[in-house]
Image: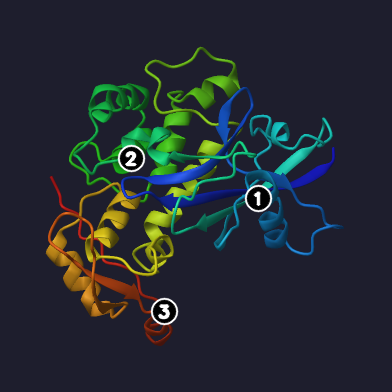
Amino acid sequence: MSLVIGLSVVIVAYDGEKPRVLTLRRDGGLAALPFGAFDPVKHRTFELALRGWVKEQTGFQLGYVEQLYTFGDRDREAPEATITDAPNDARVVSVGYLALTPEAERLPDAFEARWRGWYRHFPWEDHRRGRPGMLDAAISPKLLTWAAGNSDRLSRAENAFGLNGKDWPDEAVLERYELLYEAGLVEECARDRGLPLPEPQLGEPMASDHRRILATAMSRLRAKIRYRPVAFELMPDRFTLTALQSTVEALLGQTLHKQNFRRALERTGLVEGTGKMESGTGGRPAELYRFQREALRRAGKSGLSAPVVRG
């Protein structure tokens, strides 16, 4: 058996309404993350290889990038399908990356890459307009049936999905997806194990194990917002505080308390008013701010407070 090192990347942007990820079409038309092989002879580093073939595949130039996780499970579903020249007996180990960009720019027509809202794949994760109905109508009953008589399963389901009076932990995206997979409630599980498709369909599936990789990136980003100011990597050079809050809310899938968010933001010293006002919105003009990277260097680690409005 040969070993192939693949590199995958979750590229995230915010379009003013929802977080989007850059995807390609593979494995019978399913959405897939950009994915390519690392050539130890041709490529000096993983990141240089990643930047190179992402540009080749999508026409997109990566900016902020960080390593996410290494995915090497033996039973990953046909990952070699995303590396066309991999040997049939290859064991593919995928090193995942997270990339952030300030805008979901239009991609060249010559490429098949498209921006897609990430909640299409995880509709139970968006609580900005309240708890999604599918949680109580479809997910919770099936999970509780699956966990019946097993205290470990029940505890995991309660903690991950906020059942039986528990709070919803927004950063537990990966734990929730893995529970749904283990319980046979997502299409990838049926596909991998040769089982009938579950009903109802819980979000759109992705090629190979790419929905699991996306869940890992969402978990990382939601957790990191609170201790590193990564949300600013999705913002333009000048932005309103309302736009910044909307971006954080979209990433977390939660509604934040406006006054508490702004008070906490002011204490960080990470934003500075420009004295200029937003124009052309049709409403009351709002001041434009900028991110003070120099303040971050002085303060060290500093994230954004996310005071969630509990229903």
List x then y, in percent, for residue 269: 28, 81
Decide if residue 17 is on the left or right side of residue 76: left
Q: Identify which amino acid the numbered label 2 is placed on.
A: Glu
Mark 2 and mark 1 lie on one chain; the one further toward the N terminus is 1
The residue mark sitting in front, 2 or 3, is 3
Nearer-the-camera pick, 273 or 211: 273
List x then y, in percent, for residue 100: 49, 58
Contact check, label 2 and label 1, Cβ < 8 Å: no
| Residue denoted by label 1 | 54
Q: Is residue 237 above or below residue 246?
A: below
Decide if residue 45 is on the left or right side of residue 121: right
Mark 2 and mark 3 lie on one chain; the one further toward the N terminus is 2
Q: Is residue 89 above or below residue 44?
A: above
List x then y, in percent, for residue 32: 58, 36
Q: Is residue 287 above or below residue 296?
A: above
Mark 3 and mark 1 lie on one chain; the one further toward the N terminus is 1
Q: Identify which amino acid the numbered label 3 is placed on.
A: Arg
| Residue denoted by label 2 | 125
| Residue denoted by label 3 | 293
